[in-house]
Amino acid sequence: MRTQESTIDHMIVGAVEKRVHRLCRQYADRLPFHGWHHVNFVRAKAAGFARHNGADVAVVEVAALVHDVNYLVLRNSPAAAGRSLRREILAECGVPARIAGWIDEIVDEAEMATRGRDISLEAQALSDADTLFKALPVTPVVLAHRYLRENGLSLRELAHKIVGEQCDVHDEGYYFYNPEAAATYSRWATANLQLWQCIKEAVDDPTVAELLDAVHAVDALAS
């Protein structure tokens, strides 16, 4: 395990945490999936991965805290949509402009839809934490419906998104960058992706689609 001296004071990290936590509470109704429960999980796991791979822990923590503010700006959006708000938060909390720019790059690097095999150590730590949240066995059961509601997606759209963005990365061997994370969580990730592949196939079946339409009709009457 390697360690690196932090480039951000812990007081600044705390200020960013308080600012993001306040936003998550203020707009909790808009963030049923990407709310504080998600941010705090990713922040804790990312810090651990950063300590293991020698990345700048404080920079990774701050990147984790602001990595999903785009969902406050625009539903179902890429990380880049949150750049202005992210930079505003970082500036308000005293993060130097140079470091804020680096954090913005880390967030973009770590994004599942576009990340590559060779990304920075900081982006690897953030990516592994965010990816783990996706791969948790409880996520499709407890949280998937929240993602649908938050982003205005259908189950079909979500299944196609997950399979389209994640399966190639998984098959090419860098779903997780940290070897220990890969050893510990790859079984979960494989099962999760197999489930979503099955969901993708199922919702494209006309009979299943008819069933889902009937269920939605009942839900609409109940509400």
Image (cartoon, rainbow, N blue to C red):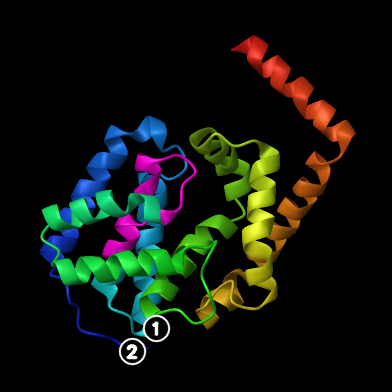
When asked about the image quadrant of residue 99, the answer is: bottom left
Q: Secondary structure at mark 1?
A: helix
Indicate the amino acid at tag 2.
Answer: Arg
CB-based contact (under 8 Å), mark 2 and mark 1: yes
The answer to whether 127 appears left or right of 84 in the picture is right
Which residues fall within the magenta stretch? 61-79
Is residue 147 in the magenta section? no
Residue 180 against residue 138 in the figure, above or below: below
Indicate the amino acid at tag 1.
Answer: Asn
- Quadrant containing the C terminus is top right
In the rendered image, residue 71, in percent from the top left (x then y), is placed at 40, 44
When asked about the image quadrant of residue 57, the answer is: bottom left
Tell me the tag on residue 53.
Answer: 1
In the rendered image, residue 110, in percent from the top left (x then y), is placed at 44, 67
- Quadrant containing the N terminus is bottom left
The answer to whether 41 appears left or right of 211 in the picture is left
Q: CA distance from mark 2 to mark 1?
A: 6 Å
Residue 167 against residue 66 in the figure, above or below: below
**Crowdedness near tag 1: few (<14), some (14–19) or many (≥20) residues, C-alpha within 10 Å:** many
Q: Residue at x 19, y 62 (%)?
A: 13
Residue indicated by mark 2: 2
Q: Earlier in the sequence, mark 2 or mark 1?
A: 2
Q: Residue at x 28, y 86 (%)?
A: 3
In this orientation, which residue lies closer to the viewer: 35 or 206? 206
The answer to whether 204 appears left or right of 119 in the picture is right
